[in-house]
Image (spheres, rainbow, N blue to C red):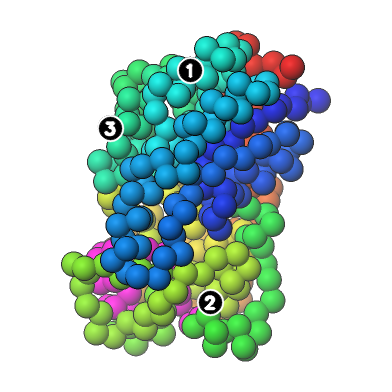
Amino acid sequence: MNPSYRILFVGFISEDGTSAQRFGALQRLGHTVEGITTSNPFRGVRNRVLRAIFGRLGKYCDLRGANRRILERLGQERFDILWVDKGLVIHPATLVQAKVLQPHLIRVSYCPDDMLNPAVNTPRYLATVPHFDLHVTTKSYNVPELRQLGAPQVFFVNNAYDPAVHRPVPVTDDDRRRLGTAPVGFAGHAHNDRIIAMDALARDGVPVVFRCSTWSRGLVRPHHLNVVMGYVGGDDYAKFICGCRICLGFLFKGNRDLQTTRSVEIPACGGFLLAERTDEHLALFREGEEAEFFDNYDELLRKVRYYLTHEDERFRIAQNGLRRCRESGYSYDAVLESVVRQITGLCGASPR
């Protein structure tokens, strides 16, 4: 029987996102989890300029007082694990003092991004690297890089899905109109390479929709692509995936992505995944059996056209992808259980 731990979880738990999903998964695994949020308190500000300023401050400044609250709670109650989810605002001194307050505490850093990307990390984060007992990363190339920065233990995990969110759901005609679904769709951040590829698909007669929440300066202007603005999450995200016959899986080159959360979220919803071909994608899903992949635009266009006219084959691959997600343990529950086993193996990580 796996041990049950008391976990102090620090992350974006007050927002709809993967950090909150990991928080819930740890609870489902039977652990006692207390949360300290690092979410930007000004996220709902309507003024665009102020929202941009506060958004930047939210990345670099501890607007929620998380460092103070961590030490307060550790001074009041005993915990087994301090779990910091993408801790850009956590100070090295906080981690040092945490170990002074509770010498048996295991300090865990979980980061879903490329934390060696200068656009993502901060000098403060880099300074904390040696002070975590375990780093968990979804970026395989970060493993040696984190070790070089002084990380004592680094554990690579694949991206995961939340079974409470990412699952097959019925989609009504009203849902399709409200969410702007199309035969081919992509929901995610706007980057030029993605826009160019989808605009080319639209130019070549493919009914494709791009659902995104923000549009920044410097992005190319699409001439043919149907762009639907507005964040889509929770059940609506699952409905968007289920409402599209083909779901594209673009990678973020700035993060050196070899896989993303969409890589498993789309198949977990029963969606048909057509993603950029990488070794990690090929390890997650059998090509042509559980998902499909492409190397260039010509292959993307050819496969889109093929699967839009071969419904039975497309449906079979999507169902196989869903089965693979469930049988191979791609859920957060299964992935975080493997992380907890790593924690248990560390010296002093015994529940009290």
Residue plotted at (32% across, 78% down) = 201
Residue plotted at (54% across, 33% down) = 69
Q: Residue 128's spot in the image, x, y percent? A: 38, 25
Q: Residue furthest right?
A: 1
Q: Check disc 3: other Cα within 10 Å, few if <14, some if 14-19, many if 20+.
A: few
Q: 217 or 305: nearer the eye? A: 217
Q: Residue 219's spot in the image, x, y percent? A: 22, 69
Residue plotted at (29% across, 78% down) = 199
Residue bounds of the magenta highlight: 181-201
Q: Judging from the image, what secondary structure is the residue with disc 3 in?
A: helix
Q: Judging from the image, what secondary structure is the residue with disc 1 in?
A: helix
Residue plotted at (74% across, 17% down) = 352
Q: Residue 222's spot in the image, x, y percent? A: 25, 79
Q: Are marks 1 and 2 in contact (CB under 8 Å)?
A: no
Q: What is the CA distance from the residue labelled 3 to the residue labelled 2?
A: 41 Å
Residue 168 has which mark? none
Residue 97 has which mark? 1
Amino acid of disc 3:
Pro
Amino acid of disc 2:
Cys
Q: 107 or 195: nearer the eye? A: 107
Q: Nearer the viewer, mark 1 or mark 2?
A: 1
Q: Residue 27's spot in the image, x, y percent? A: 71, 41
Amino acid of disc 1:
Gln
Q: Can you say whether 86 is above or below 46 in the image?
A: above
Residue 123 has which mark? 3
- Determine if residue 235 is in view: yes
Q: Which residue is mark 2?
A: 244
